[in-house]
Amino acid sequence: MADTPFLTDVKTLRDRARQHLDQGAVTPTYKGDVSKTIDLLQSVLATELVCVLRYTMHAIAATGISSEGVKSEFAEHAREEQEHMMAVAERINQLGGRPNFNPEGLLTRSASQYTEGTNLVDMIKENLIAERIAVDHYRELIRYFGDNDPGTRILIEGILVKEEEHANDMHDLLVAHEGRPMLKE
Ligand SMILES: [Fe+2]
Ligand SMILES: [Fe+2]
């Protein structure tokens, strides 16, 4: 709108803040669609939950020569995925939603898959695939949230950076265990 000032004056800000206290962190400058944002974050929550489960299972089940280093890497990723899970659940709550932890339908809500893998290399590959799916999914969400919901965007940006690191970690492990570079020179 042409007549909307760049910055809202303090009095209006104060008056507006007093209204709709039931909406918590969602204020009139929130340009996103709150219920759509909550839906999208439910899918991120499910993705993170599936990642927690998969990495935890792999951390326990990984066996074989030189599996110890890989096991601890899986365990570390499981912890970090859990932090993501908590942060996303908190955000859903801030926006007035109820984080969906229901195991029923979890895989349908999640972007990444739960694949156990039969050996160490398969496990690493499955995790790399899951990380690549998460990276793609989160990049799209960041573009979608843009300036309409900077809070959610920044949250997902932080998670994206971690997932890129995870993908890189899995790629490095794969190279180490397959004994050859996976990427074309
Ligand atoms: Fe994650
Ligand atoms: Fe990850």
Image: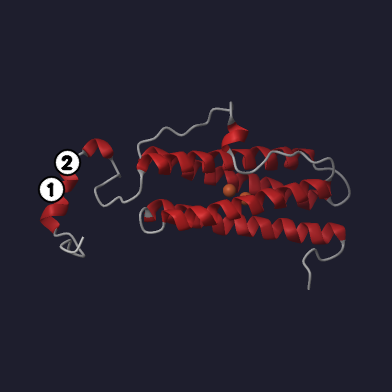
Give the camera-side residue of 172 and 131: 131
140 left or right of 174?
left
Determine the residue positioned at 17% across, 41% down: 19
Determine the residue positioned at 63% across, 59% down: 165
Q: Please, what secondary structure does the residue beneath circle 1 have?
A: helix
Q: Do labels 1 and 2 touch, CB within 8 Å?
A: yes
- Where 93 falls versus 143 (above or below)? above
- Judging by the rendered image, the residue that carries numbered circle 2 is 19
Amino acid identity at mark 1: Asp
The answer to whether mark 1 is within 8 Å of ligand 1 is no
Q: Quadrant of residue 178?
A: bottom right
Q: Mark 2, residues whose alpha carbon is within 10 Å: few (<14), some, or many (≥20)?
A: few
How many marks do you count on the picture?
Answer: 2
Give the camera-side residue of 119 and 27: 27
Rendering coords of residue 2 (x, y %): 19, 64
149 left or right of 174?
left
- Looking at the image, what colour scheme do you see? secondary structure
Q: Mark 1, residues whose alpha carbon is within 10 Å: few (<14), some, or many (≥20)?
A: few
**Which quadrant would the N terminus be assigned to in this image?**
bottom left
From mark 1 to mark 2, how far is it between C-alphas? 7 Å
Determine the residue positioned at 26% across, 52% down: 29
**Which quadrant would the C terminus be assigned to in this image?**
bottom right
Residue furthest to the left in view is 11
- Judging by the rendered image, the residue that carries numbered circle 1 is 15
Rendering coords of residue 93 (x, y %): 39, 37
Q: Please, what secondary structure does the residue beneath circle 2 have?
A: loop
Residue furthest to the front in view is 2
Rendering coords of residue 16 (x, y %): 16, 47
Amino acid identity at mark 2: Gln
Residue 121, disc? none
Rendering coords of residue 87 (x, y %): 47, 45
